[in-house]
Amino acid sequence: MMRGTNAMRVLLVEDDPDMAESLRASLSADSHEVDHANDGGIGEQMATEGGYDVIVLDCAPTAESLRFVSMPTTLDWYMKHVFPMERRMLNAVRPLVNRMSPVELPTDSYFANIKELFTRLDGIDTVLQDPQITSVRLVTNAERMVLRETQRAFVYFLLHGMSVDGLIVNRVLPEEARDSFLGALRVSQQQVIEEMVAYFEPVPVRRVPMFAEEVVGLDRLDRLADLLQELDPAPAAVTRTERPYSFERRNGVHQVRVAMPFAGKGEVGLFKKGDELVVEVGVFRRHIGLPTTLAALVPVRATFEDRTLVVELGEPR
């Protein structure tokens, strides 16, 4: 947990009542003031009111979490490019279609609800992409296939403008396993962890050993919390402030520089649409809004420098 830190006001967003009560008890025992929201809607309302030092949100698995963080950008594109035309078109044809079709078109309240959702989400992408406010910690296992998935998740979160400030490697076999039948597996784990440290540097990689029993119940969670506190004494501290992408001018050339570790040249797609630069990695797509001074320029060259995709912009030919 956050032992040893000054007392803080914490918002806990958790829909599992048993887990929420365990976390609340542990945080309260360390003198933190804890408010609990049992769903995202309530959590959003409470967070908007402000006054919290830390918001604890247990995200869904990676794919669902990525869909969540991409929602503001996706909805913003829809509202700009599709929503107005779709709403006008359905308002025009609804009376005729509803008289002729056994299935009625949705009423205008359908579009009003979408607009309300967009209004509620407005600005959330700014919060998510501010490394002073939001960070991502990835939990992984010391297995080669899981490492590849972690690398992809790392890239996808960076692509959506979020800062990853730590990795936690779970269920690492302890030293006592060296001379047991798990010895070979421990050697394999250590090799994978060495690769992780090299791959993700300078992002810290912290290791949590495998426990002899499943981590269930308040006592065992407390034991895990104590261990995590030793590994990271100030979990609420801001440790990484660099942004995943930036706009620069070097040697007279405008550049968009996007952190892209682990992505090969053949995996990245790139094109310009309106005033946005669209970057694709696998099935994920990120729309990067260009500043007004760059909106009229087009990509003329893209290269990789170390772990960074560098897109040079120039006048259209």
Image (tube, rainbow, N blue to C red):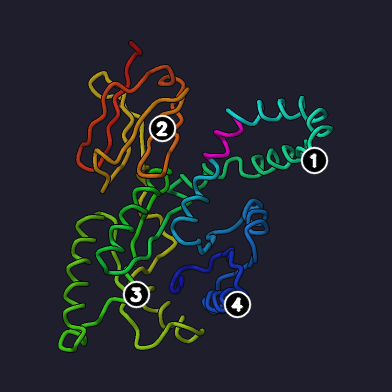
Pick the residue in front: 294 or 108: 108
Question: Which x, y percent locates residue 150?
Answer: 33, 58
Q: Which residues are magenta?
A: 73-80
Q: Secondary structure at mark 3?
A: helix
Checking the image for residue 21, the label placed there is 4
- Which amino acid type is shown beneath numbered disc 3? Glu
* Residue at 36% across, 34% down: 246
* Residue at 81% across, 28% down: 96
**Given contact means CB atoms under 8 Å apart, are the residues at marks 3 and 2 in contact?**
no
Question: Which x, y percent locates residue 57?
Answer: 53, 62
Residue bearing the label numbered 3: 230
Q: CA distance from mark 1 to mark 2?
A: 41 Å
Please identify, in this view, whether the residue under mark 1 or under mark 3 is nearer the observer: 1
Please identify, in this view, whether the residue under mark 4 or under mark 2 is nearer the observer: 2
- Which amino acid type is shown beneath numbered disc 2? Val
Q: CA distance from mark 4 to mark 1?
A: 50 Å
Q: CA distance from mark 3 to mark 4?
A: 23 Å
Q: Secondary structure at mark 2?
A: strand
Question: Which x, y percent locates residue 123?
Answer: 58, 41
Q: CA distance from mark 1 to mark 3?
A: 65 Å
* First-in-chain label (1 vs 2): 1
- Image side of residue 17 versus residue 280, left or right: right
Residue bearing the label numbered 1: 102
- Which amino acid type is shown beneath numbered disc 4? Glu
* First-in-chain label (3 vs 4): 4
Residue bearing the label numbered 2: 278
Pick the residue in front: 174 or 280: 280
Question: Which x, y percent locates residue 60?
Answer: 50, 61
**Given contact means CB atoms under 8 Å apart, are the residues at marks 1 and 2 in contact?**
no
Question: Main SS type for the magenta part?
Answer: helix
**Where on the picture, by quarter, is residue 207?**
bottom left
